[in-house]
Each structure stands twice: as structure tokens, then as C-alpha cells.
Image: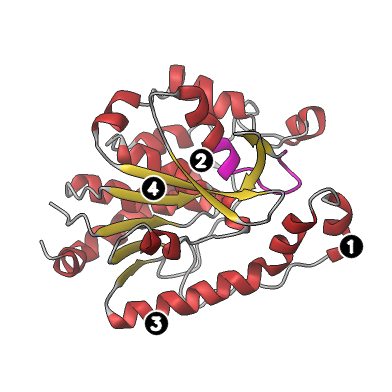
Amino acid sequence: MIDNSIGLVLEGGGFRGMYTAGVLDAFLQQELYFKYVIGVSAGADYGVSYVSRQFGRNLAVNEYVSDPNYCSWFHLFSKGEYFNDDFIYSYLPDHLVPFDFESFTASGVTMKVGLTDCNTGKADFKTLDATDKVRFATLLSATSSLPVIARPKKIDNEFYMDGGISDSIPVQQAFNDGHKRLVVILTRDAAYRKDQVKFLPFWKRHYRQYPRLVEAIINRAAQYNQTLDMIAKLEKEGSIYVIRPNETLPVSRMENKPKRLEKVYYMGLEQMNNEIGRLKEWIGI
């Protein structure tokens, strides 16, 4: 049993999250269950199947990512969003690759998702409740609502977008929630640093009704890189255990070819299986 003082933090990264899916399935194989999980964007999307203990579910969902009903430029131009939320968060988990809402609830896990408040530009964190399927779907949609290719989502009378804008790797929130040590799954290799956003006039014009959101977009690279520096420091001190790709993943965040993403899944699964002993030693089990 993993000590309740240890939390699990999941970075986003779009379809690079298939690496995270592989790592999480290795956890399920080893019966490593964290009682606290916090994720943003794709990290949250892939993480829910870990909490519901559905080994291989993310891999099964991956078979649909090239389906035009899942995402398409036509859907973006006709509906204003690249991803079809109704298909991804309702039809698919209810009919095609069933999501076990009851097991999610019975797990006893506290799972939080990170959102970006469009009005304040600040991170907000909300707890997933699988007994409310509509809100559950809306929260997952909101945390993954990328700028330009998705619209803001209304939750509790506020508008939210992708959690990665304001807090891509929410380690500080996990500490604020009372956890002493953290396992952090990243989707970038150790050499990666985020570049400053370009085309500032476009962002200021496109989100002119949300000036604080624009500030968050502009400041994202600096905030992300500062978080990486903090993680590196805490990793040396022993309070964080980092799991990240050994090399640059051969897919982009928008990659939607199932076979290529399947390879990334197995990269994560194999890497975690190879280092599971070291992780267990760090956890103390």
C-alpha cells in the first residue's frame, strides 16, 4: 500500500500522453495505487482510466483517435472546436470503450484536474466526481480545451480553458494539498525547455475579452521552465520521483495516428517496467 502522503502528478501534452498511459498501466500491473492524483489536460484524460483501474483502456480508446468523429479540421471549421467533446467524453465512454464510473468512485482516490480561469488567468483545481457524469465530462473537456482550437467551457458560472496554460505540472498544488512526496510523470525528456510564445498581437486580439488569459499564455514558458527547475531541485532532495521519456517522443501533441501512438504507449510501459524496482524502493514498499 502506498503511503497517503505520496501524491501522483500528471503533466499534459496532448497525444504525447500515450506515454503516460503506458506508465500508468505498468502501475496497474504492479498494483501501485495512489490515493491522490492531480493532472492537467491530457494527463487528466488518461489518468481517469488509471483511477478506475481499467488496464489497457487508454490503448483501446487510441484506436478511435483517427476517426473524424473524434477530431478533425472539418469539426473545427464547422463547430469551432477541433475535438468533438460529445464523442470523446460521452458517446465513446458510454458505448464504444466503456468507462467504469462505479469503479472510479469505489477506488476512494481523490483526483483533481487543473483548469485555467479565463477571467483571472489563474489556475483552478476541481475534484472529479464520477457520480455526476455531465460535470465529470465537462471538467475533462475544460482541462483539455486548448487555445484557438477549442472554446472556453462554462463551469460554476465561470469560463475555463486548458489547465496547462496556467499550471502545466501542478506539483505546488499537490504539496498545498498536504502531500509530502510526489511521483511526477512528465511527457518531455530531460533536455526540454519551453520556448517563449510567438505572435503576441494575435493572442491579444484573439482573446481580447480575456486580458488575464493572454498574460497567462505569454508567461506560460517562463512559468513552465521555473517549475522544471523546482522539480529538478526537489528530485535531488528526494521529495519528488520523476518519470519522463528517456528521449524525445516521436509524436507531437496533435498526432492522431493510432499505430504511432501505440508505440509511445509501449515506450512508457516498457520503461516503467524496467525501473519499477527503483520506484518501489523510493516509495518504501
**Upstream in sequence: badge 1 or badge 2:** 1
Residue 208, placed above or below residue 228: above
Residue 7, placed above or below residue 197: above
Q: Amino acid at mark 1?
A: Pro
Q: Is residue 254 visible?
A: no
Residue hosting label 2: 258
Measured in 3D between alpha carbons, the distance from the residue under mark 4 to the one under mark 2, in whole angstroms, is 14 Å
Tag nearer the camera, 4 or 3? 3
**Going by the image, does 173 lie left or right of 180?**
right
Residue hosting label 1: 201
Q: Amino acid at mark 2?
A: Pro
Task: Count residues near mark 1 (Cα–Cα under 10 Å), then give few for <14, some for 14-19, many for 20+.
Answer: few
Residue hosting label 3: 233
Measured in 3D between alpha carbons, the distance from the residue under mark 4 to the one under mark 1, in whole angstroms, is 36 Å
Colour scheme employed for the rendering of this structure:
secondary structure
- Residues under numbered marks 4 and 2 in contact, where contact means CB atoms less than 8 Å apart: no
Q: Amino acid at mark 4?
A: Ala
Measured in 3D between alpha carbons, the distance from the residue under mark 2 to the one under mark 3, in whole angstroms, is 36 Å
**Upstream in sequence: badge 4 or badge 1:** 4
In the image, the segment drawn in magenta is 140-151
**Upstream in sequence: badge 1 or badge 3:** 1
Picture coordinates of residue 131, whole percent (x, y): 38, 24
